[in-house]
Image (cartoon, rainbow, N blue to C red):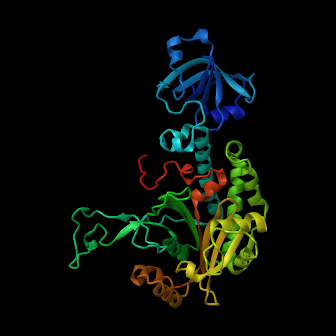
Amino acid sequence: MSMKRTKIKDLIEHGELNAKVLVKGWVRTFRSNRFIQINDGSTINNIQAVVDFEKFDETELRRITSGACLQIEGKLTESMGKGQRVEIQTEKFEILGDSHPDEYPLQPKKHSMEFLRTIAHLRPRTNTFGAVLRIRHALSFAIHKYFNDKGFVYLHTPIITGSDCEGAGEMFRVTTLDPVKPPLTKDGKVNYSEDFFGRETNLTVSGQLEGELGAMALSDIYTFGPTFRAENSNTPRHLAEFWMIEPEMAFYDLKDNMDLVEDFLKNIVRYILENSAHDIDFLTKMYDQDLKNTLEFVISNDFTRIAYTEAIAILEKSGQKFEYPVSWGVDLQTEHERYLVEKHFRRPVIIIDYPKEIKAFYMKQNADGKTVGAMDVLFPRIGEIIGGSQREENFEKLVNRIKELHLNKEDFWWYLETRRFGTAPHSGFGLGFERMMLFITGMSNIRDVIPFPRTPKNAEF
């Protein structure tokens, strides 16, 4: 009967001494033809396998190179080396996949992030990206667990849509029409009535509008799916394809929304600190010495809640020289948001009641006629991490706002009908998953917190 493989994480944490074990993984290093460092991706830590050179064929030993995949059978013993509890005394090994040592790009040395982006098919094997991808999994699970435990329904909203939630127009078109000779209308425009869906369609920028429909029947829902922006931006904070978490809650006002978002963020950060400790320790050591303290900062402080008008007054009186001048009516920039969080309040901040002219059409209009019930959550290092609002449930006000912004009312007929048939106060927010990953991992470029980044002129892997 063949022996069952044990994951390296389990061996390191609670493997039984003197037990016979079988591990499979990829060679990180093979030093002096005696010590193999092997990793299977289950943990940031390698396990060491000790090889008695005289017991094995020299030709086979030469095949053990960085990047090779192999399985090792042996006895688990107490390690004599520093920094490791156990090691394997190798009795048998088998090469499962050779790695050509002169060509393997991940040699045992530190590589730049820029270089690793050119080999996205191999970078998950590095310590850094192994840690990032395990944290990405843990954060995804924490989010699903949080909403499930709260009784929310996970709603799958469409990826292909005919509406533009944000009104920015930077969307990827979905079409089956001939790109060279598309059918045209009498006035020379593309005739989308002959397209697959019979109309112009795009990849979604948000699942919010459809999420609101779900909340008007199920009370509390959340979406967690891919979204797309055709924004030709090559900054460390932009992706063309990214993931969004968007809960929508019936019968929630703006205060309820703020209470939920604070509890949600503290909960998922706490989960990572408790369940991804080794990976967070590694990233703290290698990339951001304040990372662990920054995460603790979020869960140990109540979030300050202030109105936009008060935030502007604080910034105007700060004496700081900002690159972007501050005045009532401007959209806050990252430098303004970080000042409020890191220097003035020294805790996370939620800003509410923004000028309606800088916010989306669907936000609840306040009685002053100038502001809306918007909500932005500001974090250290990142600035805005979540945007949300109470949604406008009044049919007439929503129609008027659509007209003011010169949007096509017909594109939102289904959205408006929820305001005619049993409307209710409701609220929601959106969290960019990769933006949260930047905060959690301390990485500086958003391309390094997603397995295969999609950016302008880059969709190879």
Q: Is residue 64 left or right of residue 268?
A: left
The residue located at (68%, 51%) in the rendering is 272
Rendered image quadrant of residue 410: bottom left
Q: Is residue 249 visible?
A: no
Question: Residue 92's spot in the image, x, y percent?
Answer: 57, 17
Question: Residue 441's spot in the image, x, y percent?
Answer: 65, 50
Q: Is residue 123 visible?
A: yes
Pick the residue in front: 238 or 323: 323
Above or below, 49 against 337 in this view is above
The residue located at (20%, 79%) in the rendering is 186
Question: Residue 5's spot in the image, x, y percent?
Answer: 58, 30
Number of residue marks = 0
Question: Residue 313's spot in the image, x, y percent?
Answer: 73, 79
Pick the residue in front: 260 or 166: 166
Q: Is residue 211 left or right of residue 193?
A: right
Pick the residue in front: 70 or 109: 109
Q: Is residue 448 left or right of residue 285?
A: left
Rendered image quadrant of residue 72: top right
Above or below, 275 against 407 in this view is above
Q: Quadrant of the N terminus?
A: top right
